[in-house]
Amino acid sequence: MNEPAPQSGTRLKDKVILVTGSTTGIGEAMVRLFVREGARVMIHGRRRDAAQMLADDIGERASFVIGALEDPQVPARLVAETVGRFGRIDGLVNNAAAITHGSIEDTDQKAFDLTLAINLRAPLFLIQAVFPHFRKQGGGRILNVGSINSYCGERILLAYSISKGGLTTLTRNLADAHAAEHIQINQLNVGWTLTANEYALKMKDGLPDDWPTRLPKSVAPSGRIHSPEEVALAAIYFLSDEAALINGAILDVEQFPVIGRNPTKEAK
């Protein structure tokens, strides 16, 4: 029996939204759902073939731009090309991230600098580039995609966790400083999500094909982890007019409280 076709909505009707890192995973899910809700989207990635394929699949309401975010010239260019293509920009989603592995013993300067350049410096200067357009238009929405690792982080995700902690401070600082300008800046701190890349990574680590169905309740109380589409649904709210007065919010997209958590002690 065929699945019913997804229904189109109007929550993002006619909004132009730039989503960085949007050729795969959570970013791709955002692009697809944003268009379904009436938006026009600028796809961003590093690989032209992947961006072109996604844009072709979506159709006339999508375009794409290619660029490595560690290049200091790229953030302003992404914003300029979005405005050049669609005539305006209403929303920016800082989704792209470098997930570098390393503890204090094996994090070198090159990896640290690259991680912060992509995960923290690029969002800052993308926001800087988009501000003049938002001010001219009378406002706009920014959504930063962080991580629950921003609160502390895993031992082997030192540089990544530091970058996401910095992103949280950036979100709150700018939201506080510019609230009177009708510019809303919020953040999703995303937990473990079952993207295609995450599935492949765990397979490479030696887990079985069905590892997503064998997760312990300590990390997946519901028996599963988030899908990219579930994260994208949360993003729609913050970019829509429904969140017109929500500013500086950090939403943990996770199954349990990160702060003050007391894991269930089950009898063995």
Image: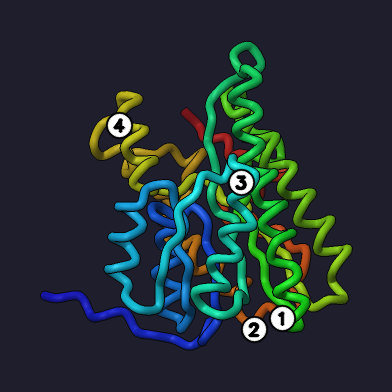
Instruction: Work out how far the residue at label 1 is from the one at label 4, CA to CA, in angstroms.
Output: 42 Å
Q: Position of residue 150 (x, y in %)?
A: 68, 41
The answer to whether the residue labelled 1 contacts the one labelled 2, judged by CB atoms less than 8 Å apart, is: yes
Instruction: Work out how far the residue at label 1 is from the one at label 2, CA to CA, in angstroms.
Output: 5 Å
The nearer-to-camera label among 2 and 4 is 2
Residue 255 visible in rendering: no
Mark 2 or mark 4: name the one nearer the start of the chain. 4
- Identify the element where label 3 is drawn: strand
Residue annotated with mark 3: 147
Residue annotated with mark 4: 203
The answer to whether the residue labelled 2 contacts the one labelled 4, judged by CB atoms less than 8 Å apart, is: no
Crowd class of label 3 (few under 14; some 14 to 19; many from 20; radius 10 Å)? many
Mark 3 or mark 2: name the one nearer the start of the chain. 3
Crowd class of label 1 (few under 14; some 14 to 19; many from 20; radius 10 Å)? some
- Identify the element where label 2 is drawn: helix
Count of picture labels = 4
- 153 or 261, which is in the foreground? 153
| Amino acid of disc 2 | Asp
Looking at the figure, which quarter contains the N terminus? bottom left
Q: Position of residue 256 (x, y in %)?
A: 60, 50
Residue 244's label in the rendered image is 1
Would residue 227 be found to the left or right of residue 174 on screen?
left
Q: Position of residue 103 (x, y in %)?
A: 61, 19
Residue annotated with mark 2: 241
Mark 3 or mark 1: name the one nearer the start of the chain. 3
Instruction: Work out how far the residue at label 4 is from the one at label 3, CA to CA, in angstroms.
Output: 22 Å
Instruction: Work out how far the residue at label 2 is from the one at label 4, CA to CA, in angstroms.
Output: 40 Å
Asked which colour scheme the image uses, the reply is: rainbow
- Identify the element where label 1 is drawn: loop
Residue at x 60% of width, y 56% of height: 94
